[in-house]
Amino acid sequence: MFKKILFATSATEASDHAARVAFNIAKTYQSNLNIFHVLGVPTRGYSQVVVDVKTKERVDVDEDYTAWVTEEIKIYYEKYLDEPLDYTIDVAIGLPAREILRQAKTLQPDLILIGGSTGDEDDIVYKKSSVGSTLQKVAKAAKCPVLIVNRPAASFWGGLSNIVFGTDFSKTSDKAFDFAIKVAKALDCELSVFHALDITSLHTGKMLSQDEIEQQIRECLRKIRSRYESRLKELKGYSMDVWEGIPFIEIVKYARDKQADLLIMAHHSRRAPSGDIKLGGNVEQVIVRAGCPVISINK
Amino acid sequence: MPEGTLCNKMPVDTAEGITTLLSDTSGDTYYQEMKELEVDSDLLWKTIQNTCKSRMKTWLEICAHCGMCAESCFLYLVNGRDPKQVPAYKIQSTLGEIIKRKGKVDNQFMRDTMEVAWAKCTCCNRCGMYCPHGIDTGIMFGYLRGLLYQQGFVPWELKIGAGMHRVYRAQMDVTDADFVDTFEWMVEEYEDDYPGLTVPVDKEGAGIMYTVNAREVKHYPEDLAEAAILFHIAGENWTVPSKGWEETSLAMFAGDWAACKMQVESVYDAMERLKPKRMIGTECGHAHRATVIEGPYWAGRKNGQPPVESIHYVEWLAEALNTGKLKIDPSKRIKEPVTLQDSCNYIRNQGLKQATRDIMKHIVAPGYFIEMSPNKEHNYCCGGGGGFNGIGKFRKQRNIALIAKRDQILATGAKLVLAPCHNCWDAIRDLEEEYEIGIRWSFLKPIVIKMLDIPDHLRPEE
């Protein structure tokens, strides 16, 4: 299932939760784990000087320095690396999102695993020209599923048994569904298909009556059945639900309710029938709030 | 030890040579060796006799030492009006002295001269506008750098940079295959959002041949996608050459005249091969100066022009906006105080001030564009021009040099600075890092893309 995993890490606390999951998955599924760290942004035009993201120091990057950083990463993850594990460590220079994507282009992993925001938005090293976070950029452009672990709560992970798949009925969501089915089958999990009926932005200025809401819920359920049920039957267990509310909140609530240990969603679904451009934002909100890892699928 | 293994009079022209130089962290050994480097006075004097022509000789001769150039030099202003920072003094005490002594100068003199040539002048050419005789110290320093390079007295990074051009015909170790591959990768990443987006490689007879800065390929490849998107939306018939795609020239900063010629000829060869109607380079100042303004002379072109009409990116962008090839959604224009950095290399030295002002009119809501003072051809260098940005040895001096730009930006009150030049963009970023004045900075491409009014047939299907 996950033969090759690219784990992008800052090798700091910010990536600790993601690391726990990364090593856990790699061990459980005997994956090849590539630990990838972007050590800093090349500043000073064409000079060799880089501001190291961890130490905040200006350093001349040469072979010795990258070797030292690689060693530091090994030490940082010592407790995981002590046990048998098929892994490699790579260190790069550049803007993190771009370098992670470049690494993915070379490695062609089955999964990119990445931690949440470093939380330090004013971090001068990465302030640079980047619009939006590393996470957003990677999730938008990656050709393979991207697994994000943002909260500590999302990282206490003992294996997979319940997967929640959130759909907005877009084409990208269909692709995400294909992936969800594949994972559920391969790992013998239950899959819950969920849609959140957005009662906030769809009908701005208009209060929906409860009858209208329930009518729409029924319609969405019908849609889920016609779209997905035939394939869900191949699984050992599945369920289908539609709840109304603020979509990202409902998804997080639903996942909690289902004791999900993985959430799968499409990231870039601006071509959704409703034209709801906030769906991208929904995934981001889910990532920030979810109590389990989230896999975002783009292509 | 007259000639070092790293620091010597030989240019670097192999990949191994570059790797060896690069592995000398910070150039420590390189600069150590430089202290022992012998000056070949005969060669120096012979070169001067062959290359120092009447303009340069006249300038050195007629300088009246009036000091009018002093106030024009931003380095003089930010260094406590140190008399040693007066342009006339700087050039007379270096190039003037070498000529006076017929090349008989020693190692210490050459090392001091190296510092003046790369840390006390960015070749911004501002002084030339204020000299009553029209003496342009920047041009003379460009010449002096050539003499220094020939003798091996050149900053470590620039020896490497010039070597990169010799080996890769690019300022970084980016091969032709890397370039095409990265461009295609980027276009692929954005083709869902812009249906039909492609990068036509080596297309003959296109309307535009686009050239870039290797840094974009190496570290900021989004820039390539953005260029493709804008050409695509504007409906241009464009192409990139698989060879001769690098517009910049660190060799020019280094004073490696032979490498300058090699580099620019690779671009001209691409022009001859693909026969585009026009060549357009990316948002880079020195690249334009190297390939469009000075290049024809390096390549020995009699008419002083590149093989095909070559314009700067801002000229194309202004044209595309003025003619409606690109349309801006007025509601998305910049609605916050914003200022503009005029790049010395194409504003002062080529007079393109109107093009950038036209662009500002299209992309900034009325009342929000605030000019720096001084501006246009009178604008100060960003503080990092002429190679200054990249030289570790002169980092301290460079950081002081940023003060002029910092204060100009602060005086506008703008928090957003548009800098359509790689060098300026770098310097402004570095000044934020150094002085933390709370600004953002950007090239034009990403800003324009965000506010485009895209025709229906070019939008992704719903």
Image (tube, rainbow, N blue to C red):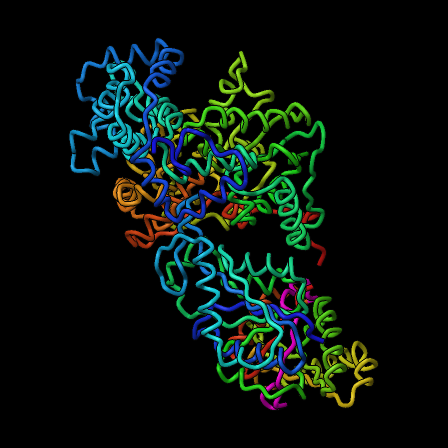
Can I make out residue B380 in this image? no
Measuring from the top left, give residue A80's x and y in whole percent: 53, 80
Q: Locate residue B440 relative to residue A201 in the image: left or right.
A: left
Q: Is residue B446 above or below residue A107?
A: above
Q: Locate residue A170 relative to residue A120 in the image: left or right.
A: right
- Closer-to-camera residue (B160/B391): B160
Q: Which residues are magenta?
A: A255-273
Residue that appears at 21% across and 33% down: B76
Residue A100 picture quarter: bottom right
- Name the quadrant of the N terminus of chain B: top left
Residue A224 picture quarter: bottom right
Measuring from the top left, give residue B408's x and y in whole percent: 28, 41
Residue A98 picture quarter: bottom right
Q: Is residue A261 magenta?
A: yes
State the residue lying farthest toward the front.
B1
- Name the quadrant of the C terminus of chain B: bottom right
Can I make out residue B298 in this image? yes
Q: Is residue A120 magenta?
A: no
Measuring from the top left, give residue B97's x and y in whole percent: 24, 19
- Closer-to-camera residue (B382/B415): B382
Q: Is residue A228 above or below residue B177?
A: below
Measuring from the top left, give residue A173's x and y in whole percent: 70, 70
Residue that appears at 41% across and 43% down: B425
